[in-house]
Amino acid sequence: MVRATSGAIVLRLMRTGISFLFNLVLARLLGADGVGVYFLAYTVTTMATVIGRIGLGDALIRFTAVHSAQQEWEKVAGLYRQSIQVALSLSLLVTGIVFVSATWIADIVFSEPDLTVPLRVMSLSIIPWSLLHLHAQLLLGLERVRDSLLVHGIGVPAINIPILIVLALALGIPGAALSFLLSTLLVLVLGIWLWRRACPQLRSVKGHYDTRSLMRTSIPLFWMEFTITVVGMMDTLLLGMLSDSSSVGIYNAVKRVALLTSVILTANNLVVAPKFSKIYAQEGVKPLGKLARDSARLVTLIAFPCLLLFSIIPGAILSVFGTEFRAGSTALTVLAAGQFVNAATGSVGYLLIMTGYEKLMRNNAILSSAVNIVLLILLIPGMGVLGAAIATAASDILRNLIAMGLVYWKLSILTLPLPDRWLRRHLIKTIL
């Protein structure tokens, strides 16, 4: 687990570096206004892609892991074909809606006429973007973590950079949108090739799968993913509406830095998610609990130095972005604390999803997101960046503590990174 997680961490850090380079090149080529228009198109496309996938991603991890472990390749083949057909149909529908309504979105919603053309161009990436995401999750179900990250994490920004330089220089913002479309198409081809190479057993298998069973799992996951994606943008949106643009800039810098505290958890999730599904199906709860606690200890051990650093010298860290960013020092400590709780509670969300309790996780996401929006509205007017940080951290902590409680309720697993003997003798007795 340590070896696999270490590899995932390296790839996640590579993704972070490549994404930073991409954003730097984009800013130099388009300027602040151009980058703003580009990311408006990107945000709308992201939302549309979530709809096109309809929650199939995490469902594919779960079912692919179980059926491949049991050598049920007919079911894997059927699962693959059914999910691709559903995602292709929905993504095609959503693409048509966004393409046709691009002028209305640009003029009425955002009051940005220059958004129409890049939004139409980028809307054409909804189909390949949805499909490459599903191929990445399928590969993750086979525990091909490296291949999955190449498809979903590293591939698009890495391929996009040279194409962006050529097309943005020639065509401006529409050229940047076109470079994203071409990148997603190329990475989709890579994802299909990696999937076929990973599953040579499927070439002669037609396969079948129960669509209703797949949808019963994926639809609750869709609402969870949609809620988290939308609300994940609300802190920046409301800060822009209720405060000023400089606060938005400071907060986004703070948020990106704070996320480093839980980047280890994200990498670890890629490793343990398919293992959770396989172990639960084959061996039961006891070994599942041991893996969950061991992974939580590993993540907490690595995440703690980040929390310590962001608590002791937050101002010095933020001054790298510029002296004005030091105003977000307290907010950095608050957000880092929220991310540390996320790491210390372990992979509780995936524990619920991979063991069939995705509806509980959906309800948890909706509740914590509602709390987040209420706190943002109450705290931002008087506290600005710090208010947004407190609201976001509080809702993150609430969501993870509730998920931890749900895992203990349904699976009798306590994921806190404490010694097993201590948990049995003290904490569980106290709860009871």
Image (spheres, rainbow, N blue to C red):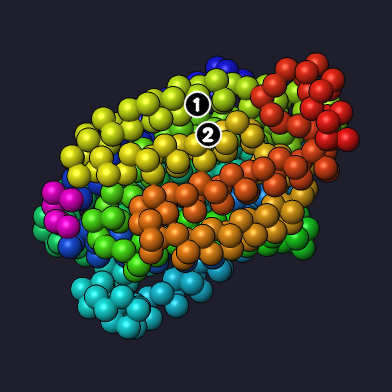
Q: Residue at x 42, y 54 (%)?
A: 387
Highlighted range, magenta = 27-32
Left/right of residue 432 with respect to residue 51 in the rendered view: right
In which quadrant of the rendered view does residue 284 lie? top right
- Is residue 228 in the magenta section? no
Residue 336 pos. (x, y %): 45, 37
- Choose between 361 and 385: the one closer to the eye: 385
Residue 153 pos. (x, y %): 43, 40
Q: Are marks 1 and 2 in contact (CB under 8 Å)?
A: yes
Q: Amino acid at mark 1?
A: Ala
Q: CA distance from mark 1 to mark 2?
A: 7 Å
Screen quadrant of the C terminus: top right
- Choose between 350 and 380: the one closer to the eye: 380
**Residue that numbered label 2 is attached to:** 340
Mark 1 secondary-structure assignment? helix
How many numbered dots are placed on residues in this image? 2
Q: Amino acid at mark 2?
A: Phe
**Residue that numbered label 1 is attached to:** 303
Left/right of residue 43 with respect to residue 47 in the rendered view: left
